[in-house]
Amino acid sequence: MAQLSVSSDAVPVSSLLTAVKYERTTALLRGRRIRKVVYYPLTDGEDGRDVEDWDFGPWHQPTMGVELFTDDGACFSAVWGSSFEHYGLELFPEPMTAHLRRIGEPCGSAPIEVTNHPRWSSLVGRKLTRVEIVWSEDGEGGIRLPLAIRLCSRERTVWIAAGRPADWPPGEVYYLATDDVMVVFTAEFTAKLGIPVIR
């Protein structure tokens, strides 16, 4: 079983995902309409309840994951994981409670609904015409990693990726395949991150 860890007590529950299961899950999401979006950023501070900053304009950092609810009652969780021998973005057809511990607890992760956020508004309620896994080869090891998923409607594309800024506060350098989740809203920022373009 894959071993996962982070510096916080908000550790994910281990899961083992295969490429076939991943493709099946994206196929389940395709054709549905997103009704609700919930982020799971970490909390810190003196009492462990201060939600870390997550809104950076063209990208968001819900560090532990994103939960997507569809109009037909289904629920999908996008989290970072290491099922493919290194950190990557993983998608499961189940609620976030199946993947995270300490939700809502001090120094855990906080559920933050972002359904009405302007960056999500043009995707929420629209049919997902394409849901694709963005795979990459790890330079030296040749490991195939799921860097992101791409959610497309006719009007909008949103990427959910495993990645983070190299520095804090965020600067110009970002890393992919980390134990963090990012949501990216523009093709320009996706290119800056190095997420391959799917045609």
Image: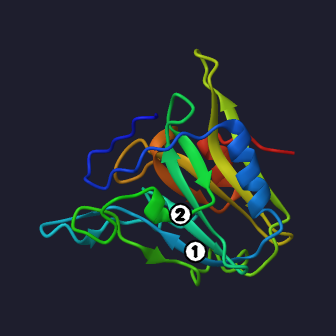
| Residue 6 position in % (x across, y down) | 32, 44
Q: Which corner quadrant of the image does residue 22 belong to?
A: top right
Which color scheme is applied? rainbow
Q: Nearer the viewer, residue 11 or 62?
A: 11
> Tag 1: Cα neighbours inside 10 Å, few (<14), some, or many (≥20)?
many
Q: Which residue is mark 2?
A: 66
Callout count: 2
Where residue 4 appears, as percent x and y from the top left, is: 39, 39
Q: Nearer the viewer, residue 131 or 15?
A: 15
Q: What residue is at 21 percent from the left and 67 percent from the top?
A: 106
Label 1 element class: strand
149 over 128 or under it: above or below: above
Say which residue label 1 marks: 37
Can residue 65 be seen here? yes
Q: Are marks 1 and 2 in contact (CB under 8 Å)?
A: yes
Residue occupying the far top of the picture: 140
Q: Residue at x 74, y 63 (%)?
A: 29
| Picture layout, residue 147 above or below residue 32 | above
